[in-house]
Image (spheres, rainbow, N blue to C red):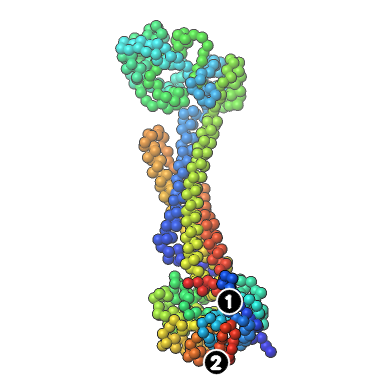
Amino acid sequence: MLFDLFRLSLRNIRHRGLRSWLTVIGILIGTAAVVALISIGQGLQRSIATQVERIVGYNTILVTSRGLNLGQRIRLDIEAIRAIPGVRNAIALRTETAYVEGPGGKGFLTVFGYDPAMEEFVAEMDLTLSAGRALQNPGEVLLGSRTARILGADVGSTVSIEGRKFTVVGVLQAQRAQGFAGGGMPLVDVLVISLSELRELFPGPELVQYAVVRLADQADVAAVREAIRAHLAAVGERNATLTDFEDLTRNIQSVIRGVQAFLAGIAGIALLVGGVGVMNTMYTAVLERTREIGILKAVGAKDVHVLLLFLFESGLMGLAGGALGLLIGFGVAWVATAIVSRVFQAQSAFSPVLSLALVVGALFFSFLVGAVAGLFPAYRAARLPPVEALRYE
Amino acid sequence: MTAALVELQEVKKIYWLGEVEVPALQGVDLRVESSDFLALMGPSGSGKSTLLHILGLLDRPTAGKVLWEGLDVTRLNGGKLAELRGRRIGFVFQMFNLVPNLTALENVELPLVFLGVPARERRNRAEEALRRLGLGDRLRHRPNQLSGGQQQRVALARALVTDPALLIADEPTGNLDSTTGREILVLFFELNKQGRTIVLATHDPEAAEVARVRLRLRDGRITERL
């Protein structure tokens, strides 16, 4: 009998034609919006997880000033950190602003101290060369692409930094920033000299932007973190904080989840409005079919049959809207991420994720919205006294 | 005295139009025995339809008793009444009252759906009922593709498909031309001859002639029995 009621509901929906479609579209838009936002959000989360892994690496601890404020420098001794058991390599980024004169120009520029330990970070730090070679001997300097233009210098030129002569041996390739180690900005207007020479030019306490600590494979992360903290305390640095891959991923993910929940909540309002549309349609249907309800009751339909008949109708419309909304929402998400990736030239392709939970959830929830919206109209239909329903013109 | 099929005792029905009391039935006693064919006659507003609705368990009396085979049904809940309606009573209305979305066959199947009859048996019984009324070639037609007489015969098939103890007809010829109306009345006559209990309401004295017993209603009372 349930199946027969179900078929009858389907028939009634089809019979209303355009009106059913309009109702379904209401649900469709809401579901599509929710599905699009959630699938984009999940895609973003996945992509960020891989990005963070690539940039920071699983086995990496960043030592920064609190709040990741890169303008705030911190005091630490990178050699001491390198000596902590479990640390495979550690580098500290130290830059100073220096007065620089070249053959064709001069000015205050950022000088970057290169540490041989940075070897393995060269790609991440944007220290790839477009001309010349890497630093080998004292008195050598690499120029950022813009610096070379400002100073009118090229490989072989001599520039003076704070009055000391350096020979240009290479020019950095102008590329986009990738790694955290690169400070998050392209190194195009810097000069790179060896860290030891930078220390000679700027004696005094060593203040660094941040340090990147890479751990040995089987290192005890907690112990290393503890040792780094102890070192920071020993040198009197109170403003530094440690971040590892998991911290970073967790923070970013929680921000994304928050934004996503907020947006999905807004989209959920659209779904609610769709539910109101269903309710409206069902109330109209109950009015229009009052006489039919009377007929059904006259031939033996119980209240519960009439209730189910109308609930099936509204639920089915909800479900139809949900199914179509799911497809369209995912389509929208796919197109949107493609456009965003293109416009912002995202380095890693990122695509929306349609999880099973999202599919099931969207279908279930849209059905639920339809059924709940139909509840009051259906109840009203079911409670109609048969005589009054039959008399209704 | 054995229990009648239906018995009304001192049945009153009052409608309220806002503050105004409208008495539709003012104390009706009536026995309907098996194989009876009663015609309720009277002008509109005399209470014919109200009486039929109460007999057919579509409505409850304001006061008085309704006994179905000796059982007082005024206290039964809506679900039980619906079941009794579906199992024991067939209705034919002036407006035919077919469900417009459904084919003739599906309309006739409808009472069986609510009785939970399996689909195959349902279909066979509905087809059989329609064939008996000469509509074997109209099974897949929708109401709006049928003439008035055909629609009323579909309605009659729907009323009979459950083999009800009581067939109730409210002005069944009221929307039909006289020839078609006569055909329908002949059908009722034949049905009663086969033992079907029928209560019919009409304001057309000629139509009432088909019944064995004619009751005249006036102002909510049975005033005459012919």
Nearer the N terminus, badge 1 or badge 2?
A: 1
Task: Please determine whether, in this image, residue A173 is positioned above or below residue B27.
Answer: above
Q: Would you say residue A2 is visible in this rendering?
A: no
| A93, A224: nearer the viewer | A93
**Residue B144, how many percent across, how many down?**
40, 74
Q: Is residue A49 above or below residue A21?
A: above
Q: Residues within 10 Å of mark 1 (few under 14, many from 20)?
A: few
- Lateral position of residue A169 relative to residue A48, left or right: left
Residue B211, visible in the rendered structure: yes
Horizontal and vertical percent position of residue B111: 53, 75
- Picture coordinates of residue A174 (x, y %)? 35, 23
Residue type highlighted by circle 1: Val
Dot 1: what SS? strand
Q: Residue at x 46, y 44 (%)?
A: A37
Which residue is painted at 52% across and 54% down in the image?
A: A369
**Looking at this rendering, what residue extends furthest in the right direction?**
B1
Q: Nearer the viewer, mark 1 or mark 2?
A: 1
What residue would you read off at disc 2?
Answer: B212
Residue A305 found in image quarter:
bottom right
State which chain disc 2 sits on: B
In the drawing, does residue A194 fall left or right of residue A257?
left
Host chain of mark 1: B
For mark 1, what is the residue? B22
